[in-house]
Amino acid sequence: MPITQSLFGHLDEIPIDLYTLVNNNGMEVKITNYGATITSIRTHDKIGILGQAVLGFETLEGYLQEQPFIGCTVGRYANRIANGQFSIDEKNYSLVTNSPPNHLHGGPKHFGQTVWQAETKTNKRSSSVILTYLSKDGEEGFPGNLACKITYTLNDQNALVIDYHATTDAPTVLNLSNHSYFNLQDAGKSTILDHDLKLFADHYTPVDKHCIPIGTIQSVKQTPFNFTTWNKIGARINKKHKQLLIGNGYDHNYVINESEHALKIAAKVHDKKSGRLLTVHTTEPGIQFYTANWFDGTLTGHEGITYQKRCAFCLETQHFPDSPNQDAFPSTLLQPDEEFTSQTVYQFSAR
């Protein structure tokens, strides 16, 4: 399973590369070392036609413009930290509030806007791009020199496996995720409101008016957030529910059901028109479901498509938002004698 490396563009005279992975079934994934970003996933529909399944841009310039984290790795802390403040061992840290009044996805110079070092690895059944980055102590306000490694592997089961690894030389907080936007029907020409969704999550974390969790874990039963059985994404998205009004749609963290397995199923999404089915497994405790509620047609991506409101969905595997300030949530603290590891699998099929 060979990997093709090509020039994607230049950033301040630094060459940026694009890596194309193709498995033995013909499924294709493209990844750039700018932002450890997934730029393209082309997979087969129910009659065998290969088509684009994620939003993205054809050139590096598309990713350099102001855009909502399309396809990139977000960190050091994916999602929000309230008021850009947290403390470790009674020492306070202040972050840039790039989504006032909160810190979002690692700040103005998040991991999706940095150049990663890349190497490749192939065998008969899979191919991998291994990306590394050293986030220096104090970068965007976070403590500790953080050594990160992300490995993208495409295998013959039509699964894109993302393995995260990190170590630090000082106590820090860490929450890494990929921010791909999916549309299983037509790469974003239409909305995703007719996609069918099932989330393996009986609870979610409701938020305040600034999208910060209020600290409770609530049942999804008898709410528009109940996707424990198959439901169309758009069936209840416009309900006059306080939580939907805050996010202008779905933009919430779900608590993935406990499992005896570390790698547990989190979500399934099916588009009946194309037949494409996405299944998500993860070792993370949460998954942020977002429905591109603020897209307005100002961005043009693959195939010249202008990206309109709700043209895609995100399923960002993660620890919970604002965990450094929420003692009841799973901890995101990473100590120097620890290794952070996490895995997420995006599996594609058609039916």
Image: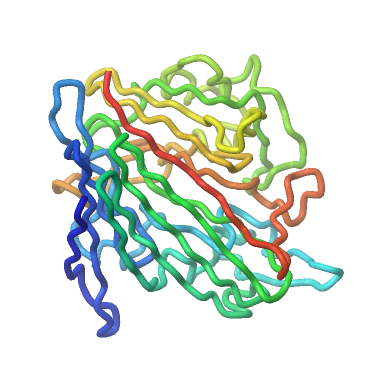
85 or 164, which is in the foreground? 164
Name above or below for residue 83 compared with residue 125: below
Query: Residue drawn at (65%, 32%), measured in percent from left and top?
Result: 204
Percent x, y of residue 96: 60, 70
Q: Pick the residue in front: 133 or 141.
A: 133
Q: Is residue 109 above or below residue 31?
A: below
Quadrant for residue 51, please give it: top left
Q: Quadrant of the C terminus?
A: top left
x and y, in percent, of residue 271 in the image: 30, 23
x and y, in percent, of residue 305 in the image:
19, 45
Residue 189 in which image quadrant: top left
Q: Is residue 266 visible?
A: yes
Residue lying at 21% horizontally and 40% vertically, measured from the top left = 27
Residue 47 sits above or below residue 172 on the image: above
Specify whether 118 is left or right of 244.
Answer: left
Report x, y in % for residue 203: 66, 27
**Residue 205 placement, left or right of 24:** right
Is residue 101 found left or right of 297 in the rendered image? right
Identify the residue at image location x=45%, y=34%. 280
The front one of 4 and 78 is 4
Residue farthest right in this picture = 90
Direction bottom: furthest residue: 13
